[in-house]
Image (tube, rainbow, N blue to C red):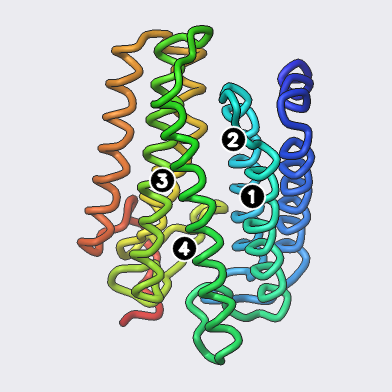
Amino acid sequence: MIDFLHHLKHRNETLFYYGLICLILSLVFLLLTKVTTTQVYNVNAWFKPFKFAFSTFLFAWAMAWYCYYLPNFNIKLFNWAVIILLGFEIVYIALQASKGQLSHYNLSTPVYAALYSMMALAASAVTIYTAYVGLLFFTNTFPDLPSYYLWAIRFGIILFVIFSFEGFAMGSRLNHSVGALNDNSSWFIIGWSKTVGDLRVAHFIGMHALQVLPVLSFYVFKNTKLTLALSLLYGLLALLTLIQALQGKPLIKGSDTKENLI
């Protein structure tokens, strides 16, 4: 692990420290879930900023690692786009959590509606920029990278982009649940619904292909055909969880009673 951190810092010191800050913030937010009682939709308000900060930490470190391979890439511009745009999201989500108010889906005032739209634009801009990075992994040659690892990065970025934009399925509904109003269940930290369909499941699985596929390919499979098969199966898993959610079915059915039903 120490060796990995050393190499990561060497590859992209800016995103290394930004990711580290996001990790520290996520731990602070997680601690706040234990010492505060403010709730939004029946869960502690600090769980949302925790999840966004931790997810941003994973994204920043993954992209810091991958972008190092790209020739003639303006990494400074990419770094600051990620820092400013995703940093804005984390700050606003945390601010709203401190007040016990919604950040996402909040159209209660013109200001909140504008800030919600700005979050959507920020997330979209980062996703489009990441799609561009993915395109560069297709249009450039990488003779020093194993074929299986290169394909894992490509598919990881493709699935990240697709299921990042799947977030619009939630934004357009102002609701991450199908069959209830923003239902949350006490399922560890992620809080996915145990009673109705939850669009966050596919969003989570698909976006984290960015980390899962390259790691499994490089350290476990070490084979191009197996990596391609893994990528297709992983994408199918994300798609099936999306279909399941749209049918109003939870990923894992629990004994929770339905709350906030539409």
Q: What label does residue 63 carry, if any?
A: 2
Q: Secondary structure at mark 4?
A: loop
Crowding around mark 4 (Cα neighbors within 10 Å: few <14, some 14 to 19, many 20+) is some
Distance from the alpha carbon under mark 2 to that under mark 1:
10 Å
Q: Quadrant of the C terminus?
A: bottom left
Labels 2 and 4: the sequence-earlier one: 2
Residue visible at 73% across and 59% down in the picture: 29
Residue visible at 36% across and 50% down in the picture: 202
Distance from the alpha carbon under mark 2 to that under mark 4:
31 Å
- Please name the residue that numbered disc 4 is placed on: 185
Nearer to me, 15 or 230: 15
Residue 93 x, y percent position in the rendering: 64, 68
Crowding around mark 1 (Cα neighbors within 10 Å: few <14, some 14 to 19, many 20+) is many
Q: Are marks 2 and 1 in contact (CB under 8 Å)?
A: yes
Q: Are marks 3 and 4 in contact (CB under 8 Å)?
A: no
Q: Amino acid at mark 3?
A: Val
Labels 2 and 3: the sequence-earlier one: 2
